[in-house]
Image (cartoon, rainbow, N blue to C red):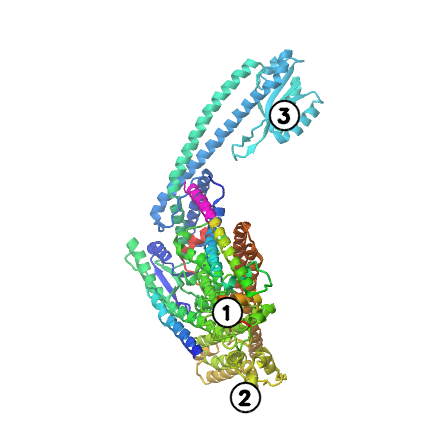
């Protein structure tokens, strides 16, 4: 569910950029150029993000960390190491 | 007094500004024990207990934070120096 | 997409201008700069054209201006910079005044220079005389003591009688220092050792009056006996270009002479400085107007050159010119012509006729300051054919984006952005820099490219989560440690299990934990490789689809079916399917499932799967796993490969057979009395005169090229992965090897060490990571566009529209 919402959120975000981004530049005479630029920007940026997101969706391997790093991660990212 | 030419003083100016901004930020990140900077700490490979490790890490983090801030202060000095040189140079060319 | 998508429509026009209005009209056209004239007198030699005398006159004026300019430069007077109010071309009456003025100035300059040379040589002679007199003082002191009454006016003519036999005579003079030894030897030889030469080198160099170069000289006095010897010595002196000076032998006379010479020198100096003043006054007054005169003359010369391209009407009543004009600019040209006529009060208007032609018009893409850089990148490969669709439009984004995939780092991107933004914001001021060197011009010309490259590099850096090789934990890492204390303390390193440690997905970009992991390269490689193939295939599919736009525009509808459809099928069924498999693999395999065939251990390699698909081969899967990702995959793959293979003969034979068929039809139609030429010309475009065998060969080459290039180009996009990996690794190495050293120092010296090492790290970052890596990423991006993208649809056989424009002429001159 969270995954779906994130994807929808970013898709909408870039769609809005593609659609309403050119409004920032309406003064320019090269209207078509600006529209094309925003459309392409939105498409490539969205796809780039999507690939990165999907690549981490179902990780097949986990990060290999050394001891010090694990300890710091545990204390800084709020997940103390369990006793035992 | 003019020591360095226009190009060198500009270079000094840019590196000083960059140094101040980045070192102050890095000091801040060290101060809040940022995980990303763990590899830059002078730490041992092995510690006997977790408490030992956390104490050592905290010390190292703070030490590095102060070092960064001091280095940033030195960059403030070079910034002032380069700015003065830059001003001198620009005045010479303007005349 | 109006402006950038295709080059503008051009019209071939014929212009009829009254001879008296010709000059002003062409001047107006030069100001607007939207007309390219064609030479109508190609076979007339340059010396027989109509306006040769005028062009010569301009050349003469230019020569004078250049002469005065060099004189001004010699004097160190700064010429004013006039970029704001560039004068218009002068009308022919004004030019006579200008000519007279320049003539006067030039002759004045020449006269002054002549006078100066005269006076300076005079000055030189006097100085030499003075030196001779001063230096001989030492030579003579001995003689006077011995009371050897030498000839008192050695250089004079009337001393011959006074000269007694047996008495010593002498000549004094000055000679170039490098000749002294030869001179001495010669004297010794002619007199059999009977000449006594004394010399003394002058310490300060004298100045050559004509050139101003310093020359070193030596003063000499030659003593000898006898009239005969004297004549010989004099001959030797002239031979060696030594100048002789009269030198009285008595001390008092010499003293007086020195005094005399000194006063004369002072006077001369005064006169010299006055001439100098006068000269710089003249030059200063001229220098105010010189740049504008120079521009006026250049414009006038350009106008006459253009008029030389015109043809005279048979009745000699009007000039006829042919030109290419963008259809959109026709009203502007009309207006310029009527303005030109009005300026001379001509009653008969000039007029413009659009004429039909079969020739290929020039390609004209109207650019603005933003698109010019990108258009230049495309034009460097080849100017688009007329009305072909222009890749520059898409390059505006795809270029910076592909660059950024290779250069993804937030910090380095920020540096590029700052540099680009500075150039863009100060572009008015910076555009005035004329002598910044070639490298500066390249950077400045590409300022918008640099800005966009920086912006995209920041975005990709954010997604890669790289800031100078460090990661930011903006949204909270989704990896948690589940190991307990004893495990952590006993193991030097641990791998977090993906099934229990990962909770959710990091929403934007790479999870920061990967930057700290020892096995991050394994993970990043698989991600970046897939990423580069996905974008590469997409880019190529886009390129192939662009060819449809061209086919419809040029009305070669048959080519859509005969070329585009098999091409896109071939690409999509093989590599598009590979992209699909990548996405499918991301979705279907995960670590949390208990279903054995979907666990990470069973995930097949997409690349191996693809190779097996092409070779119809099988690999045994590990125990408990499936070889394929979904059920009907083997059948689907076989079908895809077979269809793709069918596309090859389709591409190979489709077009030649179609041409053969239409030709036969055409011949048939002609036989029946129809002339279907006009309609078919579009369909069999460009192949009308080729024999069938050549068409087959061309098509074969084309097909083989496409099939092979599909594979090699896809592999070529892997450079996106390779370069981004190299960039990330290099920046990490730089951090660890340089900056980390400074950070790990402890104690009092730590801060100072950090200060120094940080400076070094900054310089390395700029030089290696931003400049060098940026350049290499730029070149790879350029190649990806030129070869991998544009080869799919771009012909690039056009020629550029070069309008007659004063602005271009003046800018071009300055660059030379």
How far apart marks 2 and 1 lie (CA) works out to 48 Å
Q: Which of the numbered marks, if any, corresponds to residue C392? A: none
> Residue C737 location, x and y as percent?
58, 58
Q: Which residue is mark 3?
A: C235
Question: Image check: C362 left or right of C88?
Answer: right
Residue B90 drawn in magenta: yes
Q: Chain of mark 1?
A: A
Instruction: Say whether marks 1 and 3 touch (CB < 8 Å).
Output: no
Q: Is disc 1 surrounded by few (<14), some (14 to 19) or many (20+) residues within 10 Å?
A: some
Q: Which residue is mark 2?
A: C632
Q: Is residue C674 above or below residue C8?
A: below
Which stretch is magenta? B76-95
The one nearer the camera, C630 or C100, is C630
Q: Which residue is mark 1?
A: A80
Quadrant including the N terminus of chain C:
bottom left
Residue C185 drawn in magenta: no
Instruction: Say whether marks 2 and 3 touch (CB < 8 Å).
Output: no
Q: Secondary structure at mark 1?
A: loop
> Residue A40 location, x and y as percent?
43, 71
Q: Is residue C388 visible?
A: no
Q: Secondary structure at mark 3?
A: helix
Q: Is residue C235 visible?
A: yes
Q: Is disc 3 surrounded by few (<14), some (14 to 19) or many (20+) residues within 10 Å?
A: few
């Amino acid at each position: 569910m969270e995954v779906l919402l994130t994807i929808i959120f970013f898709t909408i975000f870039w769609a809005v950029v593609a659609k309403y981004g050119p409004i920032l530049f309406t003064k320019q005479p090269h209207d078509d150029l600006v529209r094309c630029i925003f459309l392409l920007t939105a498409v490539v940026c969205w796809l780039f993000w999507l690939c990165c997101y999907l690549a981490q969706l179902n990780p097949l391997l986990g990060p290999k960390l050394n001891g010090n790093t694990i300890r710091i991660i545990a204390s800084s990212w709020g997940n103390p190491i369990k006793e035992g | 007094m003019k020591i360095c030419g226009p190009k060198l003083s500009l270079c000094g100016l840019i590196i000083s500004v960059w140094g101040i901004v980045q070192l102050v930020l890095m000091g801040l990140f060290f101060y809040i024990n940022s995980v990303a900077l763990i590899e830059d700490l002078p730490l041992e490979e092995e510690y006997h207990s977790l408490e030992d490790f956390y104490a050592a890490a905290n010390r190292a983090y703070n030490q590095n934070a102060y070092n960064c801030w001091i280095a940033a202060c030195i960059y403030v000095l070079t910034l002032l120096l380069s700015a003065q040189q830059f001003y001198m140079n620009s005045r010479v060319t303007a005349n | 997409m109006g402006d950038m998508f295709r080059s503008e429509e051009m019209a071939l026009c014929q212009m009829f201008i009254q001879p008296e209005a010709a000059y002003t009209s062409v001047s107006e056209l030069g100001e607007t700069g939207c007309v390219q004239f064609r030479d109508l007198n190609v076979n007339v030699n340059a010396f027989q054209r109509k306006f040769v005398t005028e062009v010569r006159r301009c050349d003469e004026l230019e020569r004078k201006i250049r002469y005065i300019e060099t004189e001004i430069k010699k004097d160190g007077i700064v010429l004013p910079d006039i970029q704001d109010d560039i004068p218009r071309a002068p009308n022919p009456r004004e030019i006579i005044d200008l000519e007279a003025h320049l003539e006067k100035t030039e002759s004045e300059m020449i006269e002054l220079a002549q006078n100066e040379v005269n006076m300076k040589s005079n000055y030189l002679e006097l100085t030499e005389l003075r030196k001779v007199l001063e230096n001989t003082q030492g030579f003579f002191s001995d003689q006077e003591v011995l009371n050897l009454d030498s000839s008192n006016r050695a250089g004079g003519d009337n001393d011959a009688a006074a000269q007694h036999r047996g008495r010593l005579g002498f000549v004094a003079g000055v000679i170039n220092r490098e000749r002294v030894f030869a001179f001495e030897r010669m004297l010794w030889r002619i007199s059999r050792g009977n000449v006594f030469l004394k010399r003394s080198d002058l310490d300060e160099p004298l100045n050559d009056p004509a050139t101003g170069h310093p020359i070193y000289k030596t003063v000499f006095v030659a003593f000898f006996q006898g009239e005969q010897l004297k004549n010989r010595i004099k001959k030797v002196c002239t031979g060696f270009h030594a100048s002789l000076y009269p030198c009285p032998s008595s001390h008092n006379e010499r003293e007086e002479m020195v005094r005399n010479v000194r006063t004369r020198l002072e006077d001369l100096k005064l006169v010299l400085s006055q001439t100098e003043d006068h000269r710089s006054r003249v030059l200063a007054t001229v220098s105010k107007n010189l740049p504008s005169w120079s521009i006026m003359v250049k414009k006038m010369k350009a106008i006459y050159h253009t008029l030389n391209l015109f043809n005279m009407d048979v009745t000699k009543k009007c000039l006829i010119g042919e030109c290419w004009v963008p259809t959109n600019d026709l009203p502007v040209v009309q207006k310029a012509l009527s303005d030109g006529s009005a300026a001379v009060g001509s009653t008969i208007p000039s007029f413009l006729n659009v004429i039909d032609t079969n020739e290929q018009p020039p390609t004209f893409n109207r650019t603005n300051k933003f698109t010019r850089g990108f258009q230049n990148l495309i034009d460097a490969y080849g100017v688009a054919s007329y009305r072909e669709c222009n890749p520059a439009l898409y390059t505006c984004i795809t270029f910076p984006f592909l660059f950024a995939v290779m250069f993804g780092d937030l910090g380095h991107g920020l540096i590029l952005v700052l540099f680009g933004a500075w150039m863009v914001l100060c572009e008015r001021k910076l555009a005035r820099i004329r002598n910044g060197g070639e490298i500066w011009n390249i950077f400045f010309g590409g300022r918008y490219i640099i800005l966009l490259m920086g912006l995209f590099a920041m975005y990709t850096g954010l997604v890669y989560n790289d800031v100078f090789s460090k990661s930011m934990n903006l949204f909270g890492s989704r990896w948690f440690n589940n190991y307990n204390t004893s495990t952590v303390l006993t193991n030097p390193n641990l791998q977090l299990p993906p099934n229990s440690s990962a909770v959710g997905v990091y929403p934007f970009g790479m999870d920061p934990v990967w930057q700290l992991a020892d096995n991050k390269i394994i993970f990043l490689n698989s991600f970046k490789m897939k990423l580069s193939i996905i974008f590469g295939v997409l880019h190529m599919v886009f390129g192939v689809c662009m060819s449809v736009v061209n086919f419809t525009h040029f009305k070669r509808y048959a080519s859509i079916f005969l070329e585009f459809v098999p091409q896109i099928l071939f690409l999509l069924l093989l590599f598009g399917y590979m992209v699909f498999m990548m996405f499918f693999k991301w979705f279907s395999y995960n670590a949390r499932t208990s279903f054995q065939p979907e666990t990470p251990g069973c995930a097949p390699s997409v690349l191996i799967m693809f190779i097996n698909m092409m070779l119809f081969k099988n690999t045994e899967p590990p125990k408990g796993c499936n070889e394929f990702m979904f059920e009907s995959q083997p059948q689907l793959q076989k079908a895809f490969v077979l269809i793709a293979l069918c596309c090859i003969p389709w591409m190979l034979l489709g077009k030649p057979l179609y041409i053969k068929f239409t030709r036969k039809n055409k011949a048939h139609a002609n036989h029946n009395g129809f002339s279907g030429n006009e309609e078919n010309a579009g369909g069999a475009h460009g192949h009308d005169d080729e024999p069938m065998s050549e068409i087959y060969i061309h098509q074969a080459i084309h097909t083989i090229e496409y099939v092979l290039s599909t594979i090699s180009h896809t592999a070529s996009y892997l450079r996106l992965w390779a370069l981004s990996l190299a960039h990330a690794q290099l920046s990490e190495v730089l951090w660890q090897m340089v900056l980390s050293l400074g950070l790990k120092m402890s104690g009092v010296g730590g801060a100072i060490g950090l200060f120094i090492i940080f400076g070094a790290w900054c310089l390395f970052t700029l030089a290696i990571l931003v400049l060098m890596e940026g350049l290499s990423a730029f070149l790879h991006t350029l190649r990806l566009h030129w070869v991998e993208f544009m080869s799919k649809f771009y012909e690039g056989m056009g020629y550029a529209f070069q309008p007659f424009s004063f602005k271009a002429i003046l800018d071009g001159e300055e660059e030379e």
